[in-house]
Amino acid sequence: MATFELYRRSTIGMCLTETLDHMVSNGVLSPELAIQVLIQFDKSMTEALESEVKSKVSIKGHLHTYRFCDNVWTFILQNAQLKSDEGVEMVESVKIVACDSKLLTQ
């Protein structure tokens, strides 16, 4: 697949998937068109984050789990500290999914 399905597990991604499934099951949309909508969603989210997000965050915490599969790194940190221009936030657990952005545009 040309893009990673990174944003489909977000709230908006799951709602979109659920709506498309409903439309396909009711015959309003073809399965092929629903897949194209999801692929475009992934591309649009990637482009929006690249062009709109300007802030940076530093993260410190206890590395609980990490894995590398299909050119995607997944890190799970516990007792993490997120530090940005707006302040410091402590969280119990944070999941970070990272990939090479060059692979998203292929």
Image (cartoon, rainbow, N blue to C red):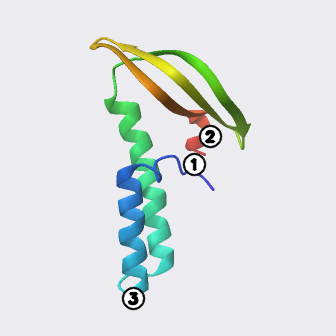
- Quarter of the image for the N terminus: give it: bottom right
List the residue tagged with mark 3: 27
C-alpha distance separating marks 3 and 2: 34 Å
C-alpha distance separating marks 1 and 3: 27 Å
Q: Position of residue 44 (x, y in %)?
A: 39, 48
Vertical relation: 12 (above or below) 60: below
Mark 1 surroundings within 10 Å by alpha-carbon count, few (fewer than 14), some (14 through 19), many (20 or more): some
Left or right of 24? Residue 96 is right
Quick one: SS at disc 2?
A: helix
Vertical relation: 64 (above or below) 102: above
C-alpha distance separating marks 1 and 2: 8 Å
Give amino acid for label 3: Gly
Vertical relation: 36 (above or below) 4: below
Marks 1/3 in contact by CB < 8 Å: the verdict is no
Give amino acid for label 1: Phe
List the residue tagged with mark 1: 4
Residue positioned 50% across, 68% down in the render: 35
Of callouts 3 and 2, which one flags the residue occurring earlier in the amino acid sequence?
3
Q: Which mark is residue 103?
A: 2
Mark 2 surroundings within 10 Å by alpha-carbon count, few (fewer than 14), some (14 through 19), many (20 or more): few
Left or right of 62? Residue 39 is left
Quick one: SS at disc 1?
A: loop
Quick one: SS at disc 3?
A: loop
Q: Position of residue 26 (x, y in %)?
A: 37, 87
Q: Quadrant of residue 34?
A: bottom left
Q: Quadrant of residue 77?
A: top right
Mark in the foreground, 3 or 2? 3
Q: Position of residue 62 (x, y in %)?
A: 59, 18
Residue positioned 50% across, 20% down in the render: 79
Residue positioned 61% across, 46% down in the render: 106
Between 33 and 27, which is closer to the camera in this rendering? 27
Between 16 and 37, which is closer to the camera in this rendering? 16
